[in-house]
Amino acid sequence: MMKALPSVSSFPVSLVFEIMNIWNTTSDFILLGLFNYTESHLFLFVMVLTISFASLVGNALMIFLIHQDAWLHTPMYFLLSQLSLMDMMLVCTVVPKMAAGYLTGQKSISPAGCGLQIIFFLTLGGGECFLLAAMSYDRYVAVCHPLRYPILMSWPLCLRMSVGSWFLGAGDGLMQAAATLSFPFCDAHEIDHFFCEAPTLLRLACADTVVFEYVMYICCVLMLLVPFSLILISYSLILAAVLQMHSREACKKAFATCSSNLCVVGLLYGAAIFIYMRPKTYRSAYYDKIVSVFYTIFTPVLNPIIYSLRNSDVKGALRKCMGHCGTSNQD
């Protein structure tokens, strides 16, 4: 059964009030954006919008199919539906503001809007990191311990992992938003980015941010390197188990699945580690913007492709749904 996730209102009210007080004492920021007003950049802008729309449609279709087809009501597909939901919300957090700023020229964003972007972005990005680790564990149990799957990957454990992913991401987002916007900012509030991101805002701070950067680095180790290590261990064990099956077809299928999944994981984690774990002296606004595109726009559209088009169960559910639609139209 699909269960609703707890809302952010469950977090300490004092932290929310602290964030609101900070927002009320800071003037608006200016997002310089990702594109210039040239023909080549206009083409890239249209391409980004097209990819974003495809991401929303693909992930919405995944959620619909998983909800509608009883055969997909398993822990694996429940986690996949949560991944699709996170990807949809991530695109909606970043792309509409970027597109509106480019089309209207109104690139200002209030401290409240900036803080909300940081909270939602880190909630979804951090939550996705832990969710991918949970999905890799699910695949490890399914391949290496299939007879014990109902015990090792029970519904209560699946729900705890899903809720835990959302809560860990939300906790990180609230703390980083409150800490980042608590710094005094210099007169020029221009953010050389297409959305509010904590490392980018720190460049505008007129105060010593070394302690916060050190704390943020520790958080990144927990939010990025730990789940990434668990994913690599899980897929390594899966490949080792498959190689022992002495079946060329099974090996080929496992390598294809693992390689495609690891490509998406590597793209997400690699880009996030590049942005959040580099020393401040090596950071460049231009490269930060380019790399951020990978985990805010490209990765969300790749996930439904990797986890659906290569999945026979999802393709079967899609054919069944299209068959029902065709029958209804004939009636």
Image (spheres, rainbow, N blue to C red):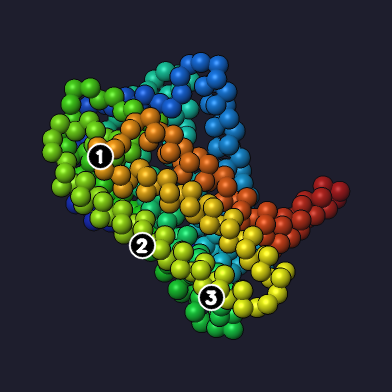
Assess disc 1: are there few (<14), some (14-19) or many (≥20) residues with their C-alpha within 10 Å of its C-alpha. Answer: some
Q: Residue at x 48, y 16 (%)?
A: 37
Please name the amino acid that badge 1 sits on: Lys
Please name the amino acid that badge 3 sits on: Val
Distance CA(mark 1)–CA(mark 2): 22 Å
Distance CA(mark 3)–CA(mark 2): 19 Å
Of mark 1 and mark 2, the one earlier in the sequence is 2
Q: Quadrant of residue 30?
A: top left
Assess disc 3: are there few (<14), some (14-19) or many (≥20) residues with their C-alpha within 10 Å of its C-alpha. Answer: many
Residue 21: mark in rendering: none
Q: Quadrant of residue 242?
A: bottom right
Residue 226: mark in rendering: 2
Q: In this orientation, which residue lies closer to the viewer: 141 or 160?
A: 141
Residues tagged 3 and 2 counted as in contact (Cβ below 8 A): no
Residue 141: mark in rendering: 3
In x, y percent, where is residue 64?
62, 54
Residues tagged 3 and 1 counted as in contact (Cβ below 8 A): no
SS for tag 2? helix
In x, y percent, where is residue 236?
51, 68
SS for tag 1? helix
Please name the amino acid that badge 2 sits on: Val
SS for tag 3? helix
178 displayed left or right of 193: left
Q: In this orientation, which residue lies closer to the viewer: 107 or 147?
A: 147
Q: Residue at x 43, y 27 (%)?
A: 34
Which residue is situated farthest in the right direction here? 330
309 displayed left or right of 195: right
Which residue is situated farthest in the left direction here? 208
Q: Residue at x 82, y 47 (%)?
A: 329
